[in-house]
Image (cartoon, rainbow, N blue to C red):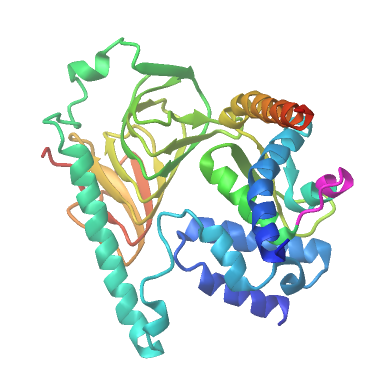
């Protein structure tokens, strides 16, 4: 088995992982192969065994029933899987967001002005990448040169030296400074409330709702197997929201 | 001793131990990548299979113990995925080291029993 054949087989065996994780794994192993110059099969064992190691403990396991699917049924299967994932994402979003009657689009809500210890603040005045992984997050923008957040969940957000803010397995309200922002959302539910900067948003099996609150935006979308509905793009808008989505949904925010 | 049984025991023992060793390596080196870590571990007398280390790094990253970023070598070539301790991993390391040393002391006491 050549290294190329090995990589192809490994990609198939890792099909149950989200795309970002899978791409990182494949790129890392290709990098190792190029630098070590040794056959992958000899060093890593069989692709299936290696994939099993990676998939151990993952939330998404191997695609269900993959072995019994014929080639002609794969397209149908993917559509079905995408649909199920979308439904699950919507259900998760509703579960997260409808547990209270809070109107997340209300920027003047008393909850957002709270000075309680639940709120954490960090000075920030630089471009920021936000990585959302199985999180439910509402983003607001403020004039301060800081990031301010309040989260429920075991894991608090982390901001690394690489200017990446990671929010995982949490439900958060987050105020951002008016600096460039890139959001990478995987299996997450996100609401953005009247963004005051242009945004680059990459979504994988995620949902995004936009509370425009009277502001016009230019929307640039690149979508595959996604549902984008109800947002009107204005060419003369001050801010551009670029959305690249895969198996995701985007819609205006409406109070539940 | 049944060889496969021993191999299973060894795999279980090494899993947590290897995670601790990776945290120690990254505590000493600000950041490192897979192949470099394999060499470091081997030089320390802990040869590790690639098929063990890379999934383990991925799991530690997903646990939030490590951060990672891609670095293109100055001499060119494929980008390398560099890992470094996250705040959570750095905070966890002393506790894990303490636990390991406690276990070692307990084992020493048991072996000294008459």
Give the vertical position of B22 relative to B56 (above or below): above
Q: Is residue A208 left or right of residue A20?
A: left
Residue A169 position by quadrant:
top left
Nearer to us in this view, A105 or A63: A63
Residue at point 61% right, 30% down?
A: A161
Residue A34: image x %, image y %?
A: 78, 65
Q: Is residue A209 left or right of residue A69?
A: left
Image quadrant holding the N terminus of chain A, namely bottom right
Number of numbered discs overlaid on the protein picture: 0
Give the vertical position of B22 relative to A5 (above or below): above
Residue B28: image x %, image y %?
A: 78, 31
Q: Is residue B28 left or right of residue A136?
A: right
Nearer to us in this view, B47 or A106: B47
Residue B42 lies in magenta, yes or no? Answer: yes
Residue A245 lies in magenta, yes or no? Answer: no
Residue A155: image x %, image y %?
A: 42, 31
Residue A254 position by quadrant:
top left
Residue at point 23% right, 45% down?
A: A93
From this viewpoint, which residue is outermost toward the front? B114
Give the vertical position of B33 relative to A256 (above or below): below
Give the vertical position of A64 relative to A61 (above or below): below
Q: Is residue B25 left or right of residue A91?
A: right
Residues rendered magenta in the picture: B40-48
Residue A210 position by quadrant:
top left
Residue A248: image x %, image y %?
A: 31, 57
Q: Does the rendering let one see residue A11?
A: yes
Nearer to us in this view, A102 or A105: A102
Image quadrant holding the C terminus of chain A, namely top left
Residue at point 52% right, 56% down?
A: A21
Nearer to us in this view, B62 or A65: A65
Q: Does the rendering let one see residue A235?
A: no
């Amino acid at each position: 088995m050549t290294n190329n054949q090995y990589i192809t087989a490994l990609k198939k065996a890792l099909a149950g992982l989200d795309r970002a994780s899978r791409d990182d794994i494949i790129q890392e192993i290709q990098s190792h192969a190029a630098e070590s110059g040794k056959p992958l099969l000899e060093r890593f064992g069989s692709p299936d065994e290696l994939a099993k190691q990676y998939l151990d403990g993952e939330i998404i396991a191997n695609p269900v029933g993959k072995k019994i699917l014929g080639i002609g049924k794969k397209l149908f299967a993917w559509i079905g899987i995408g649909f199920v994932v979308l439904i699950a994402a919507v259900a998760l979003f509703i579960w997260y967001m409808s547990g209270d009657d809070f109107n997340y689009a209300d920027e003047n809500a008393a909850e957002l002005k709270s000075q309680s210890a639940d709120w954490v603040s960090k000075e920030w005045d630089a471009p920021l990448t936000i990585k959302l992984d199985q999180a439910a997050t509402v983003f607001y923008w403020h004039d301060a040169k800081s990031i301010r957040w309040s989260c429920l969940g075991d894991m608090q957000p982390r901001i690394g030296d690489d200017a990446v803010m990671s929010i995982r397995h949490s439900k958060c309200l987050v105020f951002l400074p008016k600096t460039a922002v890139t959001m990478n959302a995987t299996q997450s539910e996100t609401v953005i409330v009247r963004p005051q900067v242009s945004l680059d948003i990459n979504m994988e099996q995620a949902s995004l709702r936009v509370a425009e609150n009277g502001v016009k935006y230019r929307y640039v979308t690149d979508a595959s197997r996604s549902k984008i509905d109800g947002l009107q793009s204005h060419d003369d808008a001050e801010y551009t929201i670029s959305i690249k989505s895969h198996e995701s949904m985007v819609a205006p925010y409406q109070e539940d | 001793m049944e060889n496969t049984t021993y191999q299973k025991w060894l795999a279980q023992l090494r899993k947590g131990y290897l995670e601790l060793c990776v945290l120690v390596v990254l505590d000493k080196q600000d950041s490192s990548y897979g192949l470099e870590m394999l060499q470091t571990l081997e030089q320390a007398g802990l040869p590790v299979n690639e098929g063990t280390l890379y999934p383990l790094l991925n799991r530690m990253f997903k646990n939030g113990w490590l951060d990672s970023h891609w670095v293109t070598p100055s001499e060119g070539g494929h980008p390398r995925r560099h890992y470094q301790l996250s705040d959570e991993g750095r905070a966890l390391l002393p506790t894990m080291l303490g636990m390991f040393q406690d276990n070692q002391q307990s084992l020493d006491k048991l072996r000294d029993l008459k």
